[in-house]
Amino acid sequence: MYTILAYAIPEESRALLQKALSERARIVFCTDKSELFGELRGSEWDLLFLFLNDAHNQMSLLDKVYRLIPHTPVILISPEENAETVVTAIRNGAFDYLVHPVSEARYEVATNKAFENKALRNEIAYLRHKQDIVYHFDDVIAFSSTMKQALKSLEKFARTDSTILITGATGTGKSFLSGTVHYNSPRKHKPFIKINCANIPEDLLESELFGHEKGAFTGAAKLRVGRFEQASGGTLFLDEIGEISLGLQTKLLRVLEEKCFERVGGNKTIYADVRVIAATNKDLPEQISEGKFREDLYYRINVLPIRLPGLTERPQCLLPLAQHFLLKYAKSLNSDVRGFTDAALEQIQKYSWPGNIRQLANTIERAVILEDDDLIGTYNLSLPEAKPKSIHGAIGRETTGSLAWQEKELILEALDACLWVQKNAARKLGISPRALNYKIKKFGITHPNWRKHR
């Protein structure tokens, strides 16, 4: 149940407020300022109704309230119906402005909007916290000179508004560091939008980037806002830009040069002030020579180029990164694992890590899940040098010791431990039942008890 504080609400409006919201909220009424500030300091509130007889002259009260509860929506109520007063109220932090007398329906609508807005802000804050992004360059693990120099350059680039091209092998942290650049730029309070150009079919990528009008093509049932519009004022990260078709490259070049575009199926020109960070693991000059990438687009995105080194070029970072991922996954998985055996550390150092940081992170996560002791050994690292024994024998096409083999083994062990109840196994593995069901179908796992349900 929500908690609502209502200040100085006229007696004739209290009953309407109670009738509109009492079923889903506890409403506390107060009548003087000392009582108001006492309640605000003593309790957390989901919503505040603030009645001001002279809203224009009493706006200082709203300012004091907002300083105490900056994250709680405040709905201002006043007999004044003046545009200037409304604008001033919203600028000073009010979520909404209602003109007294307020109907029961209006109370309900305003409250619904306030609660929805607060829920969305909480979700955004949660998702931002969960993003795999380091918000300060000083927090990025960098012990090698090559990585330190790359970070120094990116920190300088972040202060500008120019297009950045990040190159490097798969898994070197291009997407990861693009977020760090954004959150250290003048645009940090605006949207940061990512799109992987390689993961979207060519015929849908244009719509994804620029949006489409209703009826633009079969299945376009309503207007869609594209990524450039969503990122307006902020940063758009174009991952794997080398995968974009030549036709779409032409349209992208126009957006970068003129800051405008049209939605698919539309003729209305849309302007969007967007800073673009592009990334690729391809050799774009070679792509140009082969006729696969436009030379003019390359020069347009290559304003501030930076290459991220692979793990083989930054050996001093290898063990600190491994320890970082171990602590991260041990915490999220509620595991007692706290370190590596000497043999495991030696194996980590000797391995070439062709998948770079992404491969290292995935390897450590899997090892934390599989390890029963407090130190990760070579067996659970499952690197090519290791020779793990098969538990269930040969399993389909997967090679013993491969990632697929290990994943299937883990699922089988969890199912067996949970008496083949999928919901319980999913909880044990820390994934959703839907994700587990997908994996079960992928690996062709069956059990006699499931037949009657399938």
Image (spheres, grey):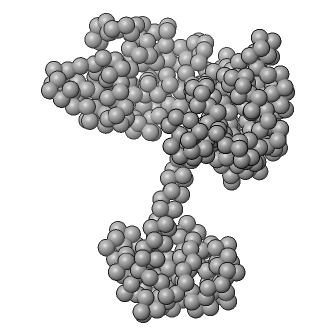
Horizontal and vertical percent position of residue 43: 45, 74
Residue at 50%, 67% (x, y): give it.
114
Left or right, residue 124 beside residue 249: left
Residue at 74%, 33% (x, y): give it.
252
Left or right, residue 108 beside residue 61: left
For the residue pair 239 and 159, the one nearer the viewer reads as: 239
Horizontal and vertical percent position of residue 315: 67, 20
Horizontal and vertical percent position of residue 253: 79, 32
User: Is residue 90 visible from the viewing direction of this image?
Assistant: yes
Residue at 61%, 80% (x, y): give it.
62
Q: In which quadrant of the rendered view does residue 388 lie?
A: top left
Q: In which quadrant of the rendered view does residue 444 lie?
A: top left
Identify whether 11 is placed above or below 138.
Answer: below
Residue at 68%, 33% (x, y): give it.
238
User: Is residue 34 visible from the viewing direction of this image?
Assistant: no
Classify the position of the C terminus by image quarter: top left
Q: In which quadrant of the rendered view does residue 17 lie?
A: bottom left
Classify the position of the N terminus by image quarter: bottom left
Identify whether 369 is placed above or below 43.
Answer: above
Identify whether 215 is placed above or below 351.
Answer: below
Identify whether 14 is placed above or below 115.
Answer: below
Horizontal and vertical percent position of residue 188: 70, 50
